[in-house]
Amino acid sequence: MNDEKVIQGLKNEDRKTQQWLYDKYAPILLGICRRYVKVMEDAEDVLIDTFFKIFTNIHQYKGAGSFEGWMKRIAVNESLMLLRKNHNFRLTVEISNVEIVTKSSALDTLQERDVMALLQKLPTGYRTIFNMYVVEGYKHREIAEQLNISINTSKSQLILAKKRLRTLLADQELGDVG
């Protein structure tokens, strides 16, 4: 089914089209929700909210950009709404002019589930900023606006997230060796 037929079916509130879209995109959109939301049940709730928004706001999709990208953006925004509701991002420590020495260590054996497991170990603020900046491609200014935090907080949370991930990766490497 092409995007135009799907969009028209959704506009007509066709249940078969809605079911087809859900079956095809639920795993992809749930993966996005899981990157942001730690508890699986909460991620599933966000997924349901995402599909509700897709189905009820289909008239807002103007055809600019990909339809899948539009749906992914809704999943990210719904995840962020849950995080904003449940977490106070202002309770973060701002740091400036931090220099972190990095040793590059390629972990060729890391798989998606391993990365997901590591991301789930990050505190909510670190995980959210990391996902928005590294995975979704937001700029620090956009992150600051979305989360109602300062740009420096966004930058510091990213630095700290990367530092924590390096520590977790090093610990994992040591566990594999030992």
Image (cartoon, rainbow, N blue to C red):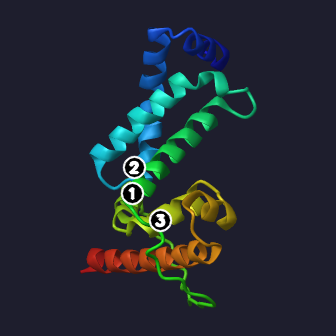
Q: Amino acid at mark 1?
A: Met
Residue behind mark 1? 116
Task: Pick the residue in front: 78 or 25.
Answer: 78
> Is residue 25 among the parts visible in the rendering?
no
Where residue 64 sits in the image (x, y, percent)?
75, 32
Q: Please tell me the numbered disc located at residue 34.
A: 2
Marks 2/3: CA–CA distance: 23 Å
Quarter of the image holding residue 118? bottom left
Marks 2/1: CA–CA distance: 8 Å
Task: Pick the residue in front: 172 or 135.
Answer: 135
Mark 1 neighbour density, 10 Å: few (under 14) some (14–19) many (20 or more): few
Q: Nearer the viewer, mark 2 or mark 1?
A: 2
For label 2, the SS is helix
Marks 1/3: CA–CA distance: 15 Å
Residue behind mark 3? 108
Q: Amino acid at mark 3?
A: Asp
Q: Is residue 22 left or right of residue 129?
A: left
Q: Amino acid at mark 2?
A: Arg
For label 1, the SS is helix
Residue found at the very far right of the displayed protein:
64
Contact? badges 2 and 1 (CB < 8 Å): yes
Q: Nearer the viewer, mark 1 or mark 3?
A: 1
Mark 3 neighbour density, 10 Å: few (under 14) some (14–19) many (20 or more): few
